[in-house]
Amino acid sequence: MLCSQAALIMLTPQQSGPAPSAGESLPPAAMVRDQLRRLLAHPLFTNSKRYPVLLAYVVEQSLQGNAGELKERTIGVEAFGREPAYDVNLDPVVRMTAAEVRKRLIQYYYAPEHAGQLVIELPLGSYAPTFRDPENHRADAASAPAEETQVLAAPAALADANRNTRTGAWTQRPWLGVSLAVLAALLLGFGAGRIHMPRKPSNLERFWRPITATSDRVTYCLGEPTDSVDRVRPASGTLSPSGSLNVSDVITLARSIVPIVPRDGAFRVIAAPVTEYTQLREGPIVLIGAFDNQWTMRLTQDLPFGFRLDNNQRQIVDRHSSPERFWTLQWQDSGAKLVADYAIVARIHDATTGQPVIILGGILAEGTEAAGELVSNATFMDAMLAQAPGNWDQLNLEAVLETRVIDGHPGPPKVVALRTW
């Protein structure tokens, strides 16, 4: 569930789910979550912000036995961050998103390459998804409503036209069918060899492996907004000045970490002030934010690169350099305009908690955002690790990055220092 300060997001594996109807057996939750990952990774969903959020939310709630609570207002509040009293008629985000999700699910399953996959559907008039084996999916498509039938009719008509054309060609040229069959067999064998060929994991996958390889619950610990001590200005727009987490940004965070959530595992997002030490002992940790996150400050105090406050100036310091070097905010127009921020990206095994920890913290919010971009972008990750030893994934790693800020928006992250140990 998504809440403000003291609340957290939790996706936990459950064996129970929505009650099946008579004679119907539900597929295992693990199979449903595997299929959900395939859907969310498809371009039909990855190119949208809202569609993956709604689909992931309703599927997970159903697997947890909460299908009966999937109402429009509930989804609007918990999945899209609307106020509890918002007007669903003036803001039909849930209805519109659900309609698009239904269409995209139909398009996805009509593709021949998805024919053998478990079927996740969002029935008309309901926000509770259904899960079933693929055998009867094509038969059910024949009885789909007119709105959905239009999506299916075009590919079917095209297939019939192509079939008639091919039949005439093969009647006139018998050798053509034989040649195409041989070619298809060769291509199929080549494709099968490629599919079974072991794939070398990317640097991005290797970086996140301490998180993805575990079956323990992962804690994402977010800082709370504070005014800059370097200059009087409002707290970053990513978190509200009231001190509560911005639900929309938490949802965005949850969506961005779908590929790295451990298989059938669980994660939660908690505000740093209410995060207890015992919670950090339970599993891997991702710390987001620096000066506004007390746990980032604690866990980096003995690292080669760390944060410090020097005469009310926020800095990142290199504790192992001689003479000591440090990085701090760069301002323009007499300190009225931020032009550069710095951040730390760390991947360590923390002795205090006994857990693997990933730290993404900037001096200000712009640096934190740039750190998040680095660890989610394969190009930036490869550029950073080009400076690291070949066995970096067996070591602790910490980097300092710089981001140029234009009109309040961080630019691409650039690594200016890196250490492994």
Image (spheres, rainbow, N blue to C red):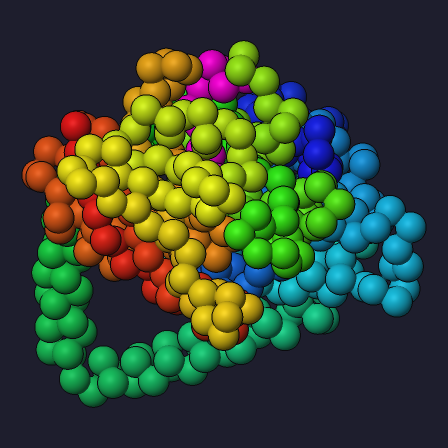
- Start-end of magenta stretch: 279-290
Asked if residue 271 lies left or right of residue 35, the reply is right
The mark tally for this picture is: 0
Q: Is residue 119 something that shows in the picture?
A: no
Q: Is residue 244 something that shows in the picture?
A: yes
Asked if residue 107 lies left or right of residue 243, the reply is left
Vertically, is 12 above or below 57? Answer: above
Residue 155, percent from left and from top: 49, 74
* 283 is within the stretch colored magenta: yes
At x 46%, y 30%, the residue is 297
Q: Quadrant of the N terminus?
A: top right
Asked if residue 190 lies left or right of residue 318, the reply is left
Residue closer to the observer: 410 or 103: 410
Q: Quadrant of the C terminus?
A: top left
* 376 is within the stretch colored magenta: no
Asked if residue 161 lies left or right of residue 197, the reply is right
Residue 270, percent from left and from top: 61, 31
Vertically, is 242 above or below 183? Answer: above
Residue at the far front: name it: 311
